Image (cartoon, rainbow, N blue to C red):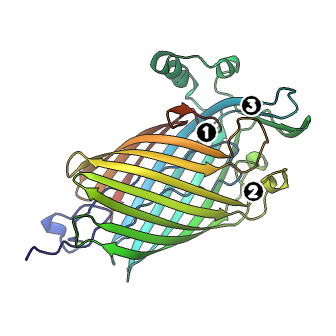
Amino acid sequence: MAPVPAPPSPLPPAPPAAAAKSSRRPLFFGPLPLRLRAGASGVVFMPDPESGAVQPRGDALLSLAADAGNASYELFTDDRLNIVREDNEVQSVRLTYRQGLGGGWEGAVTGSLLSRNGGGLDNLIAWWHRHILGYRDPFREGNAQNTAFFQFAQEGQAVINLPNANATTGLLVFQAKRQIVARTETRRPLLVAVRGSLKLPLRSQAKSQYLDNGATDVLAGISASYRPGGRVFLHTDFCGLYAGTGNVLALRGGRRLLPQVILAGEYALSDRTSLVVQYEEAMYPFSPRLPNHPDRRRQTSFGVWHDASPDTRIFASFSENIAGFQVTSQAPDFQVSAGVQQRL
């Protein structure tokens, strides 16, 4: 009879000297821990996607992730009574502590700091558009480099006008996660987990409006990871966020319930390295009611996971506002992300 494999762990097995910490072997690396960053997100709490695994009892994981997303676009009706204009960069730094509680439970707390400003990616994006993608963006090139503004008009009335949109804000997120499926005794393992989160806003600048709602938000989600065979792994993460009070809700078409979904495909180059392609779709926080304006933001990310040591894992990625081989708006033109995970 073939030996029964041990349950999976989000990090690789410890070396013999540290075998007491954990002897469980992972099945996969998981989706990239990133979300698209938008200067007018309405609610800043867009949780990083997760795999269907949880930390084993007694295992602790400390994660640090950072990204920067730069967006520049203009949309309007023919009569120019309804307009959305945005040019800014959003940087995010997140520190997360996870603890395996046993019984299939995991607890986590995340502290995040976000900043909306002019950023420093404009020159890189202009080069990328011109020399890699082969086109020029008149709206981006017509704006001053590394500036931040956001403007939104409905029926000829200026609803949002932030000519200097620089702002910072912070938040704390508490999460509980529960494993509900752990089918590992098969060639096609399946892991499924559910989670609930509570976001508490920290003091922020007044101009952080429309970057965050400054309210307490709640979230429920489900994550799944599956290996159809060979070196390929599939991950999905679906969640729904219920926003507390906020300025976006005062807008016509403002939304309180915001669903989000990611689909990720992982290919294991080796036991230590995997490549990931990840698609994200998130609901726009309000409806501008513009022609050809989708109610959803879309982004595709390309990244790599690598085990730098038995207890340390790193990732890096870049993202484009593309979906179905078409460029979409209302998402960063270009986003870069990187992070490290350390088992304690």
Relative to residue 8, is residue 171 depicted above or below? above
- Picture coordinates of residue 127, whole percent (x, y): 51, 18
In the picture, which quadrant includes the N terminus?
A: bottom left
At mark 3, the secondary structure is strand
10 Å crowding of disc 1: few (<14), some (14-19), many (20+): many
- Picture coordinates of residue 303, whole percent (x, y): 38, 42
Relative to residue 229, is residue 321 depicted above or below? above
10 Å crowding of disc 2: few (<14), some (14-19), many (20+): some
**Dot 1 corresponds to which residue?**
331
Residue at the farthest bottom position: 103
Numbered circle sitting on residue 206: none
- Picture coordinates of residue 41, whole percent (x, y): 68, 48
* Depth order, front residue of 3/67: 3
**Dot 3 corresponds to which residue?**
75
Numbered circle sitting on residue 255: 2
Report whether 6 appears left or right of 136. Answer: left
Q: How many marks?
A: 3
Report whether 80 appears left or right of 8. Answer: right
Real-space Cα separation, disc 2 to disc 3, in angstroms = 20 Å
**Is disc 2 in contact with disc 3, using a CB cutoff of under 8 Å?**
no
- Picture coordinates of residue 297, whole percent (x, y): 62, 44
At mark 2, the secondary structure is loop
The residue type indicated by label 2 comes to Arg
User: In terms of image quadrants, where is residue 115?
Assistant: top right
* Depth order, front residue of 300/272: 300
Real-space Cα separation, disc 3 to disc 1, in angstroms = 13 Å
Which residue: 51% across, 37% down?
324
The residue type indicated by label 3 comes to Leu
Real-space Cα separation, disc 1 to disc 2, in angstroms = 18 Å
The residue type indicated by label 1 comes to Ala
Mark nearer the N terminus (1 vs 2): 2
